[in-house]
Amino acid sequence: MKWVIDTDPGIDDAAAIIAAINLKIMDVVGITTVHGNVGLEHTTRNALKLVELLDSDVPVYRGASAPLLKAPENASQFHGEDGFGNTFLPEPKRNVEKTHAVDFLIQAAHRWDGDLSLLTLGPLTNVALAMAEDRSVQHKIRQIVMMGGTSKARGNTTPLAEFNIYADPEAAAIVFSSGVPIVMVPWETCLDAMLGPDVVAKVRESTSKAGVAFSKAMDLVVSRLHKVLGVEGLLLCDLVAACVAMEPSVVKEKVAARVVVETGGRYSKGLTVVDERMLDGVSPNTTVCLSCDKDRVGEMFLDALGVNHVNWRCSK
Ligand code: BDR
Ligand code: CA
């Protein structure tokens, strides 16, 4: 199975990309970038910096710079002005591909018809545009593993909405109604899978290029979390989704549901409406992951950074 990672790096996107590339479980054929945590120029540059850091030849395609209808959001308070914890890694030597991300997604869907999966870690603008431009795309994509939405309507951007969905609700509505099977890793599940101080300490032990760079970048997340939630930990939502994509048994509890996205609503724009009962006879379009094995997520990330964690679980 081939994978495209659609992303807005982003510190947790970086963790997901490091794991996806270094663990070599996924056959990643491209990274497509989108507006989101920071502007498109930053997210694209960060994706290039990351593949270079990882000595990977996965091509990077630049995508949409703005949502379909609303103004762009920004989460630089969590990800830094550069989207990578204000570490301003060296400028990448590699160039972005000439093909637009949306065209690449369409080409990839045709080329690997039925064998292409998407790991989406940002607003869904690129994916929705590909589906709108070529209606056959939705029949060709095998599945989408998505970090996004909420399972219990506890948002992180508005009281009800999660960032990736709120940042482009119309795009998310198109994707959820496309018929492509979706595995959704919602905000609440990621919050429960927050990595503890033991993992933070282990990440700091890393001597690999990626580990050293990530250690610097994560300081911002660690200090923000300490300030906002009063806990010492690492909240890496996109990494959780990447681990679900790589190792589905990471999911401990899940439910099949019909999920639709609220695009209007004075208070509810961007809400993922999760209907588990489907009383009106609709069929499920989404597997909602309700809990994940956070120790396994921590282990996979430490593996990706080349940190030895033998005996780590039993010594906790
Ligand atoms: C999601 O929003 C972004 O800030 C993160 O990168 C993650 O994809 C969490 O709501
Ligand atoms: Ca992201």
Image (cartoon, rainbow, N blue to C red):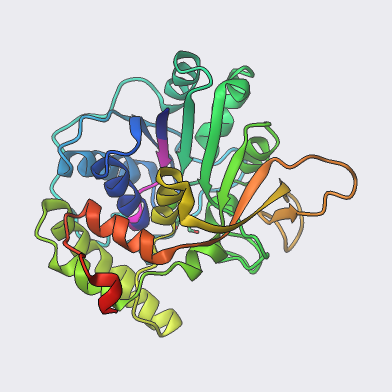
| Residue closer to the observer: 286 or 59 | 286
Q: Position of residue 4 (x, y in %)?
A: 41, 32
Give the camera-side residue of 39 and 181.
Answer: 181
Q: Quadrant of the C terminus?
A: bottom left
Q: Give the answer, above or below, for where 2 lies relative to 254.
A: above
Q: Is residue 199 visible?
A: no
Looking at the picture, how far across and down is residue 233, in whole percent? Answer: 35, 75
Identify the residue shown where x is 50% and y is 54%: 73
Q: Residue furthest top?
A: 111
In this view of the protein, which residue sits in the foreground, 302 or 264?
302
Quarter-wise, where is residue 303 in the image? bottom left
In the current view of this chain or complex, which residue is farthest to the left? 207
Viewed as shown, does residue 79 lie left or right of 228? left
Q: Which residues are magenta?
A: 5-11
Residue name at image x 38 percent, y 42 percent: 40
Q: Where's residue 248, x and y in %?
A: 48, 47
Residue 109 lies, in percent from the top left, at 49, 20
* 68 versus 206 height, above or below: above
* Residue 23 seen in render: yes
The image quadrant where one finds the N terminus is top left
Say which residue appears at 62% left-offset and 21% top-offset. Answer: 139
Instruction: Report the side of 67 relative to 51 (left or right).
Output: right
Question: Is residue 89 shown in magenta?
Answer: no
Task: Please give the count of numbered marks on the rendered protein.
Answer: 0
Q: Residue furthest right?
A: 280
In percent of the image, x 29 and y 24: which residue is there? Answer: 97
128 vs 296: above or below: above
Instruction: Please give left or right for residue 263 compared with residue 200 in the image.
Output: right
